[in-house]
Amino acid sequence: MTTKPELSKNIDVLPGLAALALFAAMAVAILSANFGPIQGFEAGAAITRSIGYALFNLERAAPVVTSEGFLMPFLAVAFVLDAALGAAVMLARREGGEE
Amino acid sequence: MVVETQYYVLLSAAMFSIGVFGLLTRRNALRFLMSVELMLNAANINLVAFSAQWGNMTGQTFSLFVLALAAAEVAVGIGIILVLFRNFRDVDVTEPATMRW
Amino acid sequence: MVGAFDFAAAIPMLPFASFVVAILAGYFTPRLLPKGGAVPGIIATGGSLLLSGWLMVTVSGTEHYYNQEIYTWTTGLAGETFDLSFGLLLDPLSSYMLVIVALISFLVHVFSLGYMNDEGETGLPRYYAGLGLFSFSMLAFVMASNILMAFMFFELVGLCSWLLIGFWFREPGPPSAAKKAFLVTRFGDYFFLIGVVAIFATFGTGLFAPRGDELGFPQLTAEALSGEMAPVVADFLGTIGLEPQTWFALIGLLVLGGVIGKSAQFPLHTWLPDAMEGPTPVSALIHAATMVAAGVYLVMRMYGFYAQLPRILALIALVGGFTALMAATMAMVKREIKQVLAYSTISQYGYMMLALGAGGYVAATFHLMTHAIFKALLFLGAGAVIIAMHHNENMWDMGGLKDKMPVTYWTFLSGSLALAGIFPFAGFWSKDEVLYEALIHGLNDPILLLAYAMGLIAVVFTGFYTFRMVILTFHGEARTETAEDPGSVRWNVKFPLVVLGTLAATVGVVNMAPVKELTGWDITYLHHWFESGIQTVTLGEYHHLLESAAGYHAADLAPFLPAALSLGLALTGAGLAWILYRGPDPTAHTDKLGSIKTLLYNNYYQDEYQVWLAEGVTMPLAQVADKFDQGIIDGVVNTISSLALFSGSRIRRLQTGRVTNYAAMLTLGLVVIVLVVALIGGWF
């Protein structure tokens, strides 16, 4: 049997008001702001390919958009993910050894 | 048709606020994780929107890193929730309130 | 060439070594310590005595004196402030005093073998450590070349006195007496300390005597008063805006506070009789011969300073004369042998102060020496009697000891004759010179004449109490069983007695001024002794200063009549005692004095009024200060801290430990920040 989504009534509304207030404040600020015209990319720019090259510090001619290199952050994130995996395994393991 | 950047930002703000709302009103730790995920991706929307605004690749590339870090965060978060469940037989975040003064 | 000066530092260091040995060996290996520390002490003080003698010979032969810095322990800013250092000043005065101190110290160590070791006392290493430390401090004090060093060792001497008076700390009396001695002398030393600071502030130096080009402060004073003020002194006087004469007198008074406390002068004399609670050799060493002399010695050391302050000199003379008289009256009614000696000590130091105040520098040094000898002798003799009487000090329980302890009797008699000032014993010559100096200067100065009169009357009382003591102790018939069969004493008691007894009878030859007048022989050796020395620290300079700065003029008077007068008075006193207390079973005559007796027994209620001063005046003041401190100063601090505590205890309730609440607060904070930034940035 499938259940259809249903509005939960078991919530604390009062703190939720704070979130609404935050949205209101940000919305007012954003709507009153002016970011100027959109510059955008050149027509026919290969965005996804550009991201791939940028991640490995590679330079290519157009239509690849040139950008700064991200090899070092890439490696750093690789380590962070590795560490997170290890941490998750360590946390998930039951205390008291193998099972 | 070109959508003004500020509407992207407004969308991002809305998503962020929804995340905050979930964080503030719910007590289930798993729902917490989902809310945090919403908030992180609200930031991604901003990155991509401004990348398009200035014609600069950095924002889009960076959003990839945010996704990767979100994955790491979820991995650790789920681990913590597992421990929480093991200790309290529940995933209600209001239960563990002993780590104060 | 290696001379005595090169070994001078060893004079105090030897007793210090014995102190270290006694305290370390006594703590770790008491069995290895021969005689509980007496042997190292005797060797050390014997060595000091030999070195002092050598030093004295060196000093006497030449015009070669030693005044050197040996260790600078604080270096001041160059040109702006001054250095603080330890130095040695070896001139006729200090070498003379060193011999006295070392001699008495040595003999007291020997005597202690009989008084402490043979009596089976416990804690001997502590006792000998105290004696060693005391000898060290006193010898170093005597050699001090500047007033700060002198002050430090002055204090150390007081500390040793506290340690030794309180030697029998398990009994109720000694600790209390020790505390009293310490506090009363500290009270005086407090003024002395301010005086030291004042001297450094005024003169920028604390030297007693010129060293190379550096002048000592007495010399700077002389320059200042004669109009050639050194710039540093002029600067300081300009700052405080006082006349030099007034300010110097103030400094002199401050330092005099320490002198009065240490030398047990009125009104700070009350500690000395109580200090008799200590072991008798300690009384002999500290409270008769040496420590009490420290105060008087200090005045002698800086006599070049005092000699220029006529008002302070008059005060010194007056205090001295009054103390001599008052203490002598109190000594007349005491029952305990040591109490009589204690009051006589106060009285005799009064004489020295009288001499110093009256311009009789040589007379004071002479009396200091003879007194050190005969009073040490009397105390040691009293110690021997106390050993024999199994520690009963009441003279009314004695009597008839003459035949049973002949050595003690004859030596004690020699000391008594010296104390009473009977011709030709040492005390006669010195006391006569004190009174003579007071008289010849007093003929031109009524204050000095008054002081002289008091000193002269005290002679009668001195003769009386001395012979009352001798007669009650040694003559008549034994009044108790202990006195019938007294304990015996050994060589270690008799040897110091014989040495001192001989000296007490003969040492007067060093300065027989009246004989010189009579015969014309040049035999006032002590005068010649002090005429040499470092320039401007000599007798001639002092006389010059006394005449030019203080306006002292000696009247021309032959010494025979005053000498005969004081001798006659002393004999009168002695004879009176003989008449009243002779016979086999003397009666107590003190009851006939009526209410005066009560007054004398209670020492003129000195203690009572000082206690009243402490409890009735000082304590309420201290309580007010305490209230201010506790209530206002502490109150402010406590209020601030309790406010912080209170607010902290309230604010911590925010920390619920629920993640949701923290997140809500963060959110609200973010809202506020956004609003504030937006309002300030004018986005709306």
Image (cartoon, coloured by chain):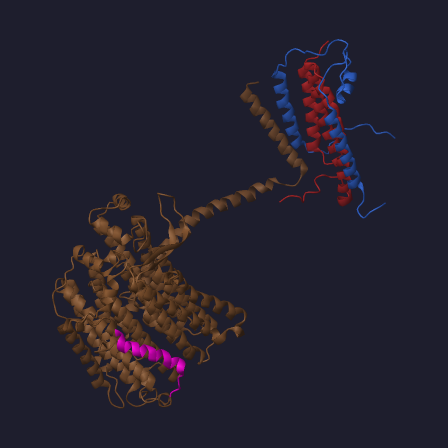
Chain colours: A blue, B red, C brown
Residue C152 position within the rendered picture, expressed as x and y whole percent measured from the top left:
38, 58
In this view, the residue in front, B78 or A4, is: B78
Instruction: Name the image quarter holding residue C626.
Output: bottom left
Taking the view exactly as shown, the residue that stands out farthest to the right is: A1
Please, is residue A60 above or below residue A96 in the view?
A: above
Residue A35 on the magenta segment:
no
Q: Name the residue located 50 percent from the left edge and 73 percent from the top edge.
A: C33
In this view, the residue in front, C681 or C281, is: C281
Residue C44 position within the rendered picture, expressed as x and y whole percent measured from the top left:
43, 69
Please, is residue C504 above or below residue C221 in the view?
A: below
Q: Main secondary structure of the magenta part?
A: helix
Q: Name the residue located 35 percent from the left edge and 65 percent from the top edge.
A: C55
In this view, the residue in front, C178 or B50, is: C178
Residue A11 position within the rendered picture, expressed as x and y whole percent measured from the top left:
71, 33
Q: Quadrant of the C terminus of chain C?
A: top right
In this view, the residue in front, C563 or C123, is: C563
Taking the view exactly as shown, the residue that stands out farthest to the front is: C1
Instruction: Name the image quarter holding residue C467.
Output: bottom left
Instruction: Name the image quarter holding residue C451.
Output: bottom left
Which range is magenta? C486-507
Q: Quadrant of the N terminus of chain C?
A: bottom left
Residue C495 on the magenta segment:
yes
How many numbered marks, from 0 up?
Answer: 0
Q: Name the residue located 63 percent from the left edge and 26 percent from the top edge.
A: A21
Q: Is residue C561 visible?
A: yes
Residue C232 position within the rendered picture, expressed as x and y whole percent measured from the top left:
29, 45
Q: Is residue C353 visible?
A: no
